[in-house]
Image: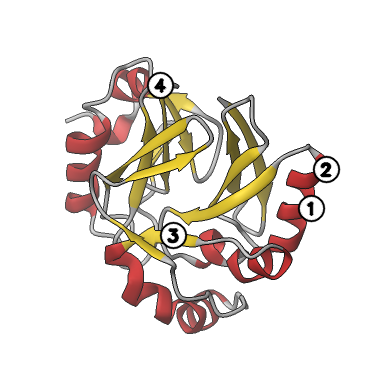
């Protein structure tokens, strides 16, 4: 599996281009602002985005969806529980943070626990991981031993700083969906560097107690 992190925006959000390392087909995950530029960067690297997935509806994870679709007509996928918050996100982001984003388009597919997202030879299993926000999901690729978890878990922290975070639900999601994965699983978070499930299990202060 080939993973390229493209860190952009005021909160240094990680957008990801993920491919199987053989075919040019790639997943564009959590496109921040400058969606057109993210697609252009993929093409410069010899990759061909074939779909967009957002782990949740916060502006720094969906702000580039419209721009990416303007460059390429890509299907947009998001968790089923995020649909309502997605519709309200443009107004919420402007009101609460002054961030202006294009109106996110209507999803082409709503993802639920156990669904599979296929890109090349990769098969991502959808995990429901709500708590940070509304209807958050993570994508687990078991063969590659990798999970893309958006803002659910980061290296040494949980992402509970946003207004409206449900901390008990967030911790439950981490405990029942992420910490059940093998320790060797690489965690690709929405902010900050990659980590592993084992490292977070042993060293993340928010998960002790």
Total residue callouts: 4
Residue 134 in sight: no
Between the residue at mark 2 and the residue at mark 4, the CA separation in whole angstroms equals: 27 Å
* Residue 44: mark: 2
Query: Which x, y percent locates residue 121?
Result: 49, 29
Give neighbour class at mark 3: few <14, some 14-19, many 20+ (Cα, 10 Å). some
- Secondary structure under badge 1? helix
Which residue is label 3 attached to? 77
Give the residue at the far right of this rendering.
44
Mark toward the viewer: 4 or 3: 3
Q: Is residue 150 above or below residue 166?
A: above
Query: Which x, y percent locates residue 75?
Result: 52, 61
Q: Are marks 2 and 1 in contact (CB under 8 Å)?
A: yes
Between the residue at mark 1 and the residue at mark 3, the CA separation in whole angstroms equals: 20 Å
- Secondary structure under badge 4? loop
- Secondary structure under badge 2? helix
**Closer to us: 114 or 37:** 114
Which residue is label 4 attached to? 145
Residue 185, picture quadrant: top left
Q: Is residue 157 above or below residue 181?
A: below
N-terminal label among 2 and 3: 2
Which residue is label 1 attached to? 40
């Amino acid at each position: 599996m080939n993973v390229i992190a493209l860190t952009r925006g005021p909160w240094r959000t990680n957008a990801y281009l993920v491919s199987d390392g053989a075919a040019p087909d790639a997943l564009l995950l959590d496109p921040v602002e400058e969606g057109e530029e993210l697609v252009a960067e993929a093409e410069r690297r010899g990759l061909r985005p074939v779909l967009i997935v957002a782990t949740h509806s916060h502006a720094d994870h969906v702000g580039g969806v419209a721009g990416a679709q303007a460059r390429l007509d890509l299907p947009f996928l998001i968790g089923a529980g995020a649909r309502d918050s997605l519709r309200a996100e443009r107004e919420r982001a402007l009101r609460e943070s002054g961030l202006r984003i294009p109106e996110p388009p209507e999803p082409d597919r709503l993802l639920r626990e156990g669904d599979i997202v296929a890109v090349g030879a990769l098969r991502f299993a959808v995990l429901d991981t709500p708590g940070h926000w509304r209807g958050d999901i993570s994508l687990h690729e078991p063969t590659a031993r990798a999970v893309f978890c958006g803002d659910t878990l980061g290296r040494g922290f949980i992402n509970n700083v946003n207004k409206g975070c449900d901390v008990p639900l967030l911790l439950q999601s981490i405990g029942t969906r992420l910490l059940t994965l093998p320790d060797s699983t690489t965690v690709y978070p929405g902010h900050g560097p990659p980590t592993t499930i084992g490292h977070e299990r042993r060293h993340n202060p928010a998960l002790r107690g």
